[in-house]
Image (cartoon, rainbow, N blue to C red):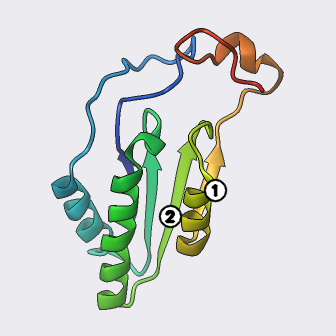
Amino acid sequence: MNLTLHLTENCNMDCDYCPNEKTAKHMDQDIVNAACKLIFSHGNSAFLCFFGGEPMHERPLIEYAVKCCEENSHETGIPVQYRMTTNGTLLTEEFIEFALKSNIRIDLSFDGTVQDICRKFKDKTGTFA
């Protein structure tokens, strides 16, 4: 089963085209627990995608979800895969190491040559650099 977790509405950017209101709303561990159980309940594979807002605002929740899924994978014998879509600006070496160890595929959202026109930080400076 494939499932996308919308971890937070918070974001460190203020892109012109984004329809989402940036708020402090975020997912809690009870929902993550239920989601991890759900993806192992049907089929012979489990796939979890972390999304937001900016999912890196909820890094501890990502790590918690991976721990829960790894436990479910071990118990059921069902393999699990992960993916995260991020703007990349909050990635750290430490998280990248965690992602490599956990086999989290990181997808970077990037607007190419119009990056500074559309995708800005909250202070309205461009994000291309």
Q: Who comes first in sequence, dot 1 or dot 2?
A: 2
Q: Closest to the observer: 109 or 59?
A: 59
Position of residue 53 in the picture relative to residue 38 (left or right):
right
Inspect the image, locate mark 2, and give the three-letter code of the amino acid beneath it: Tyr
For mark 2, does the 10 Å Cα neighbourhood hold few (<14), some (14 to 19), or many (20 or more) residues? many
Q: Residue at x 57, y 59 (%)?
A: 94
Name the residue rendered at 43%, 38% in the picture. 52
Figure quadrant of the N terminus: bottom left
Q: Which mark is residue 82?
A: 2
The residue located at (73%, 26%) in the rendering is: 111
| Residue 2 pos. (x, y %) | 42, 61
Mark 1 lies on residue: 93
Q: Is residue 3 visible?
A: no
- Residue 101 on image: x %, y %: 57, 74
Q: Quadrant of residue 29?
A: bottom left
**Residue 119 vertical position relative to residue 34 in the rendered view, above or below:** above
Identity, as a three-letter code, of the amino acid under mark 1? Glu
Q: Would residue 119 appear left or right of 82 to someone viewing this image?
A: right
Residue extending farthest to the left is: 30
- Secondary structure of the residue carrying numbered label 2: strand
Residue 50 lies, with reference to residue 119, above or below; the image says below
Q: Does 72 sit left or right of 121 as displayed?
A: left
* Residue 49, percent from left and from top: 46, 55
Locate the C terminus and report the quarter of the image it occupies: top right
- One can see residue 93 in this view: yes
